[in-house]
Amino acid sequence: MVKYLLKRIGIVLVTLWLLSIVVFILPRVAGDPVYLLLPNEATEEDREELREELGLNKSVPEQYLIFMTDVVAHGDFGESVYLKEPVTDLIIDRFPATLKLASVTFACVMPIGILLGVLAAIRKNRYPDVLARSVAVLGQSLPGFWVGIMLILLLSVTWDLLPTSGMGGADTYVMPVITLGWVSLAGVTRLTRSSMLEVMGTDYITFLRARGVAERSVILKHALRNAAIPVVTMGAMMFGYLLTGSIVVESVFTWPGMGRLAYESVSRADFPLIQAIVLFYGVIFISVNLLADTFYSWLDPRIRRT
Amino acid sequence: MDELLVVEDLKTHFFTRRGVAKAVDGISFTLRHGESLGLVGESGCGKSMTCLSILRLVPEPAGKIVGGRILLRGENLLEKSGKEMHKIRGGQIAMIPQSPMTALDPVFSIWSQLSETITLHQQLKGKSVWNRAIDSLREVRIPAPEDRLRAYPHELSGGMRQRVIGAMALACEAKLIIADEPTTALDVTIQAQYLTLLREMRSRLGAGLIFITHDLGIVESMCDKVAVMYAGKIVEEAPVEVIFKSPRHPYTQALIESVPKLDRKTDRLKAIDGQPPPLCDVPAGCAFRPRCPMATAQCNKAPSHVQVQEGHWVRCWQCP
């Protein structure tokens, strides 16, 4: 068991290290913050001066070495070129908002999605199925920004039921969660439905009925547990996407989260911030992956390792 | 009363876009306590569907039992409520499915599934459930039953899984065992062991057995009487010695002929020309007529039962 964990941790570290190389090189190839920081009239001298100040005149491998030493030895990811603040502070400041939004969305989408999926499967081609599939299709077809804006128009402006933007009490969560979650709901519903249908056609389900097990037990205890395996795996990955993909929702609802920070950092070629955010996203996905694996092996005894 | 199971003119039809498939088309037979009936026939002749019909597990909405009576110890199963059927399935009637590899829920332990079945049908609680489980596993000769109970299905071999399924029938004191080709998926040496086990189970429970198979060799060793099915109907029924010594129906004769014999040297295997008809398109009259070497114009009309002797009857015009 210990050996397995060590191996896992080793793989994680190597992955993060490789990620750090990629995230270091790519922005430097694609952009130059110096051009964005100084006005257009600035001379080449001014630019060189700024480059020296930021340490961008050194070779890329040299910059990388400095960066890695800072990170490993001092936990220092540098300062945002644009905002002049330590990058770690910025992330810590903005991440909780995204985390809250993603968590609430996840907590709503999973139960509703699984419920709809199960209903759709056991009442295949009847009303619950049609309803569930319609909701899913809409979720996958309607663009997020449109849904968000329409919700604001309807619920905030016309009917004055909810606040238009910002993060605050429970009522500020309603529209952002719907906007962010609808796509994910579609995925969960469809996967649950098809997984349930597949499971319900198996020999062991028929044999359970042949043993006189009550239909309710057959569906909710046996079928659901088997069908949940791919859904749970997908759910864990989905949480990672919710955490890292909230840029549109955050923009529409002026949600003070990390999505906007990430977008702005890329458009401003703010290297330290980009690096830190992407590495952070990498850690999120790796953790989420590990979580999914753990869930998976808990649910399916065939996968467990002794 | 002597009869355990009386099936009268059972009809199960499937309503599809291509027409009505008469999977079970007027099946009748009787089974006494402790008796075993072999149900023989090619794939698709309706053997499995007959048994699913007895258990009332016909896949709906496409399939439906449209006629007949099924009397288990004098009570018509077709008139029972859903709840009553739940009690009967797994309790009085135990099914042994064809493929042990896929018959058990992979995410629950053997103990979980065995105890679930036991508590459903036997009035037992707590430790006595455990004891009953251990006992039934011992009876099916599973070594180290305590360890096996903690295991998951994928940790057991096919033969072991089939034994666990047998243990379920034993633990719930079944009166009728319906075995749907239980040894088809096992290799030959395990097959022999399992059949012995099945015989022991039968005598222990005093249960009746319906044994579905397409293997005539097994029929000879396991069954008291045999019913041969073709295209949803029983075409011949006789005690086992009789059916091998003097089969009357051309189909039965052809089936027996087609089994290769070890003591005879043959270059070609004897097969039956043609294919069984698709169940939604059974020819009028005798369904076997297109493939029958003895068919005449008379066979255009559906043949009725002809009694050959006590306990032996055929559905054929050509048999005196």
Image: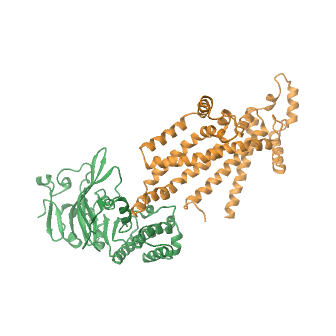
Report x, y in % for residue B189: 40, 72
Report x, y in % for residue A298: 59, 59
The relative height of residue B224 versus residue A217 in the rendered view (above or below) is below
Q: Residue B25: in sight, yes or no?
A: yes
Direction from residue A70 to residue B152 in the image, left or right: left
The relative height of residue A189 versus residue B250 in the rendered view (above or below) is above
> Which residue sits furthest top?
A41
Q: Residue B260: in sight, yes or no?
A: no
User: In the image, what residue occupies the spot 68% across and 57% down?
Assistant: A8
Q: Quadrant of the C terminus of chain B?
A: bottom left
Direction from residue B104 to residue B3 in the image, left or right: left
The relative height of residue A110 versus residue B34 in the rendered view (above or below) is above
- Indicate the chain coloured green by its letter: B
Q: Report which quarter residue A19 is drawn in.
A: top right
Direction from residue B103 to residue A283 in the image, left or right: right
The scheme the figure's colours follow is by chain
Q: Quadrant of the N terminus of chain B?
A: bottom left
Report x, y in % for residue A115: 51, 49
User: In the image, what residue occupies the spot 37% across and 75% down?
Assistant: B201
- Indicate the chain coloured orange by its letter: A
